[in-house]
Image (tube, coloured by chain):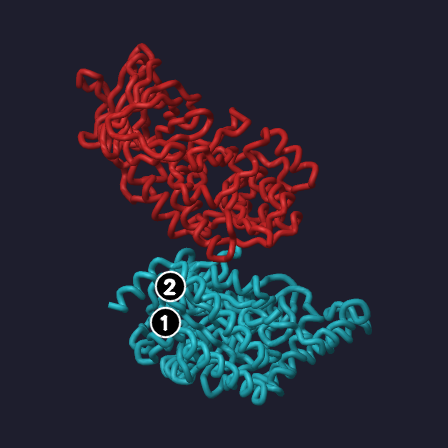
Amino acid sequence: MSKKVVVGMSGGVDSSVAAYLLKKQGYEVIGVTMQIWQDEAECSLETNGGCCGLSAVEDARRVARVLDIPYYVMNFKDEFQRDVIEYFKYEYLHGRTPNPCIACNRYVKWEALLQRSLAIGADYIATGHYAQIAHLPNGRYAIQNSVTAAKDQTYALYNLTQDQLAHTVMPVGVYHKDQIREIASEIGLPVAHKKDSQEICFVSDNDYASFIERETGKKMPEGNFVDTSGRVIGRHRGITHYTVGQRRGLNIAAGKRIFVLEIRPDTNEVVIGDEKDVFSHTVRADRLNFMGIEDLPVGESMEFTGKIRYGHKGAPCTAKRTGEDELTCYFPEAVRAVTPGQALVLYRDGYVAGGGTIL
Amino acid sequence: MIYLDNAATTKTAPEVVDAMIPYFSELYGNPSSIYEIAGKSKEAVDEGRSQIADVLGVFPEEIYFTAGGSESDNWALTAAYEACRSKGNHIITTKIEHHAILHTCEYLERERGAKVTYLDVDEKGLVDPAELESAITPDTILISVMYANNEIGTIEPIKEIGKIAKEYGILFHTDAVQAFCQIPIDVDECNIDMLSSSGHKINGPKGIGFLYIRKGVKVRSFIHGGAQERKRRAGTENVPAIVGYGVAARRAWNSRISRTKKEAELRDYMIDKILREIPYCRLNGDRVKRLPNNVNISFQFVEGESLLIMLDMEGIAASSGSACTSGSLDPSHVLLAIGLSHETAHGSLRLTLGEDTTKEDIDITVDKIKAIVERLRSMSPLYEDFIRENKQ
């Protein structure tokens, strides 16, 4: 009896080729697109490239026809609203910069979608992520770097549990991006030349502040820009317009390059400073998830390569377990713009050892 | 395949297809042209119209062909609103109407200054005529209540509502897409001014419907252009579809009593079997005032989408909720309107029988549903908790 796998199909090249590769490997493949957008009117608004919009469904359906696999659209509107959109809003309102893809992966794709896939008889789910799944000598599952370093998508997958990883297949990670597009062309997939989607899937114009205003129905109050000594140096448009390390859009005549250092939601202030102030050596994180390593006992330290942002190349660091749910990470070479709400992901030997949310 | 989604669409009967075929490549004339072959098409359109008028018990000139039930609904509401705008701007309808009615009402509210009352229904899906009457204001110009609901099968008190409409001199429209040729409809007894219907629900072709407009009701045209349909609905007639529709209507009407008796028996057999053999489920809609072929059940601790997908894997076609364009499912607004919680609405299944459905089909289907429900429940932590709590 061949194993059944549900492939999460976004209508993009990567997940389409993932479905093809798995079918070739002998799996019984079922294509599924997650319907996560809240309002039907939204589907007509996005043009192309919007992940999981209506045109994405049509693309995925066409690919499923070419690959001759059954295809369904599953409704995850409620889960997405609750676990991704609400989380997104909450973080921004509290002065943090969230990474919604991490939440979607953990709670929508790998919880809701996985559960429903198992319910309909699948053994695994699969995605088109550039990542691999390793079964380590210590018996644990871990996300492993893909061969395409530039397109590596392991960062957003650090929060998956062992059970979730045990039920996952990721066929694309052993290929380079160009190879994937080549395969897509060769087999005649209608999406072979489709552009990759770059933005967050539910905010099509990258304007997060407006999105949050619309969703909450409230305009964020203006407040003060202050420098590191507390002196007021200008007015900000509302804390949701800013993130740590930001240089553009500040509208302060300073005569030199200035950056956002910190967002203080309690006093509605945004702290501004020089470039050098944007760098720090220490990163603290909570809401820890251990992946490749089983645990780091309280008080102990270990060395890793740490990433503090999706686009961060990663840097050597020493992480110490400083609390039941806290890691304090020291980077000998200071890292730029440590942002509360983003994830700290720790790698060892090319796989994800664990991670947490930056405090 | 066991097809149990006849409320969504039905198989076009072979004799209907046979009747349509000559009008594609042989008698292909445009009914508005003057030459002989066109005359044949014109005759066919007249014949289709007469057949339908006979079944409904109205004059042929009162039947206007459209591209389907949705167009008829849009037309009825928009044209009636425009025609009566000088007298008022209030429309009364219900929360359980088809989206073609609801979205047209929303459009009229948003763009044309209409005020719409969406009546509640009771837990069986029935509208209360007294509630309707109390919603009437001097500005009320239109009442639209569906004859029978497509999701839960409940048949509305149309006669009482028609009486009220007549008393107050308000135009009365009914969406009879699910009811036409299934249950007897007397437009005069019920004071119905306009009625929508669709061909593909009665083993006729897709893409054709009609709007009945009582003589004397002055509503303007909806699709502008040529002079077809007495200048009220432009567009070259879909001759083959009209022919098919006429044949389908006559066929469905002639077989109605025996056919719906059999369907109702199988329906009741299925409902009883499910309620008896599967725990923690309930029937939605009125048990008695119900379309002869409709079964709608909510299963606790079950995700309706998974149930449908697994039924599909077993070759059984059913539905639940209202399909959105992507093909995924939202919880039905009808189920929410009769008071079901979000979760319960999510765990619902609609099975609608057809003229070909056999007792064997029902037995196989119910057994499969039972097995799937058991499996899904075994994987549900909520069910686990529930069983544990009840053991104590």
If the image is split into quadrants, where does the N terminus of chain B sit? bottom right
Left or right? Give the position of B319 relative to A359.
right
- Color of chain B here? cyan
Residue B280 in view (yes/no) = yes
In this orientation, which residue lies closer to the viewer: B223 or B388?
B388
The image shows residue A130 at horizontal and vertical percentages of 52, 33
In this orientation, which residue lies closer to the viewer: A122 or B209?
A122
The image shows residue A178 at horizontal and vertical percentages of 62, 29
Q: What residue does disc 2 label?
A: B301
Left or right? Give the position of B217 relative to B383.
right
Given the image, on which type of amino acid does mark 1 rest? Tyr
Q: Residue at x 30, y 61 (%)?
A: B385
Q: Is residue A4 above or below residue B334?
A: above
In the rendered structure, the residue with mark 1 lies on which chain? B
Mark 1 secondary-structure assignment: loop
Farthest residue, direction top: A255
Say which quarter of the image contains residue A201. Answer: top left
Q: What residue does disc 1 label?
A: B280
Mark 1 or mark 2, which is nearer the start of the sequence?
1
Mark 2 secondary-structure assignment: loop
